Image (cartoon, helix red, strand yellow):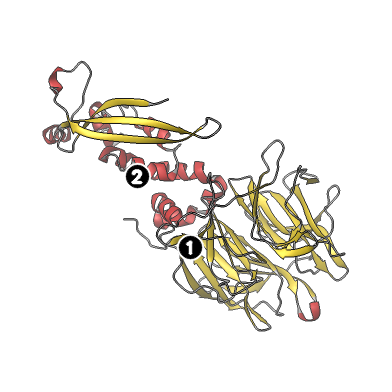
Amino acid sequence: MEFQGELLNFRKDGTPLVNRLRLVPIHDDDGIITQVIGIQVFSEAKIDLNHVSYPVYKETCNQRSDHSANYSPRHGQSPFTQHQEICGILQLSDEVLAHNILSRLTPRDVASIGSVCRRIRQLTKNEQVRKMVCQNAWGREVTGALELMTKKLGWGRLARELTTLEAVCWRKVTVGGAVEPSRCNFSACAVGNRLVLFGGEGVNMQPMDDTFVLNLDAANPEWQRISVKSSPPGRWGHTLSCLNGSWLVVFGGCGRQGLLNDVFVMDLDAKQPTWKEISGGTPPLPRSWHSSCTIEGSKLVVSGGCTDAGVLLSDTYLLDLTIDKPIWREIPTSWAPPSRLGHSLSVYGRTKILMFGGLAKSGHLRLRSGEAYTIDLEDEEPHWRQLECSALTGIGSQSSVVPPPRLDHVAVSMPCGRIIIFGGSIAGLHSPSQLFLLDPAEEKPSWRILNVPGQPPKLAWGHSTCVVGGTRVLVLGGHTGEEWILNELHELCLASKLDSEP
């Protein structure tokens, strides 16, 4: 429904003006409003503010001086309450009400509202409000991981940098210790500010069963092997994930006796870390080169991969590890993406998953894929759907392009729900370290190239990646000839490390 009317507003000096506003909704083919066009014209207001039939509040410099002179704050009272009787925009009697309203907005909307006037700007600068805004937008688990970063930047600055990516950069990190013997096709994940690596393929396809940890909080981080009472059978082509802040979970891969479908968990913070096997219900088929992720901090999701007969898979399984007796459950869908291996699963919006790339079945062929699919496991009847990514013009340092098809690439879920992918096995001459950005929650998602300064990995194929503290992406496994170097890491910083907020 169209709106047209006049609003009374004021200039900075207090003189009134009229804002003639017209709002026109735009409907799609189904009659649903998709956008609203607003047109406004300002003109002088010829009214006497002392003879109007409704209350109009105008604060002058003299009034501000009078309030400052007469105001003496009581213990625990906010200094903003001195303006409550003259705030014509909010008309609030309790500042807590304003904070509760603001905390329900998105970070971008709070930043926009903060530019309306000085009074609201002061309200939005409340650190607790900013934390609640981020928590509502990104979830408690994500904001919990970001807690350490906010001590340096503050929630407002952090939200801005993660939204605009104005501070993103590459840097090279050299660490001590060693992961020995040398290996490839290992799997790694982040546990807080620690990187954990398990297994891999050694010399002559030897399956490895050892666990290494790199503590990035240490003054001089070094790889250290963990002494455990027992280890899962050695393997490569498996997945390693983190659960509930300190638990590790290993699934599948290729061992000495062939492909595996077992599950092992370990509490990294236990006095004596021990891998324990979890058996529950009918497990998925044994597989390798599958993909996995965790949702809601405790549920393992496994998708696709390859059987010992070389058959590609298209199934999706879930294992809830919070219950006493976890049971594997296949996610039934009326349609699934073509079967594949070497793809990635990225979580956004708490229970939503983005599948990208891989070596996928296409008729009688197996081809690299550049397609993206999404599923929401919170739906009553979850179903996969393919994302139709448009090619829009980029803004600033971001330009629009469709990523070349690939497998064994790196995929990163950002706190604000966007996905970054790069590297992998790519046909042709495309740069493997080129970064692509996608927001799957957009009405019309589009890939954009993200130009990042610094030192990116020269090669990014068969890498493992870990997101540390929510803002640091560590890439493991610089491949040079036959050697896999784990002492030179590449870090993609999503936020700056300044100690003050402007």
The kind of residue tagged 2 is Lys
In the rendered image, residue 153, in percent from the top left (x then y), is placed at 40, 56
The CA distance from mark 1 to mark 2 is 30 Å
**74 left or right, relative to 203:** left
SS under mark 2: loop
The image quadrant that residue 208 belongs to is: bottom right
For the N terminus, the quadrant is top left
Above or below, 466 against 55 in this view is below
Give the residue pinned by disc 2.
125
Picture coordinates of residue 129 (x, y %)? 41, 41
Q: In the picture provided, is 310 more to the left or to the right than 226?
A: right
Seen from the viewer's position, the closer of residues 356 and 202 is 356
**Split into 4 quadrants, where in the image is the C terminus?**
bottom left
Nearest the viewer among 233 and 338 is 338
Rendered view: 168 above or below 11: below
Q: Residue furthest bottom?
A: 481
- First-in-chain label (1 vs 2): 2
Res 85 label: none
The residue that appears at 84% across and 56% down in the rendered structure is: 285
Disc ID at residue 450: 1
Residue 332 falls in image quadrant:
top right
Residue type at numbered disc 1:
Leu
Figure check: 216 above or below 202: above
Q: Position of residue 32 (x, y in %)?
A: 52, 31
* Residue 270 visible in the current orientation: no
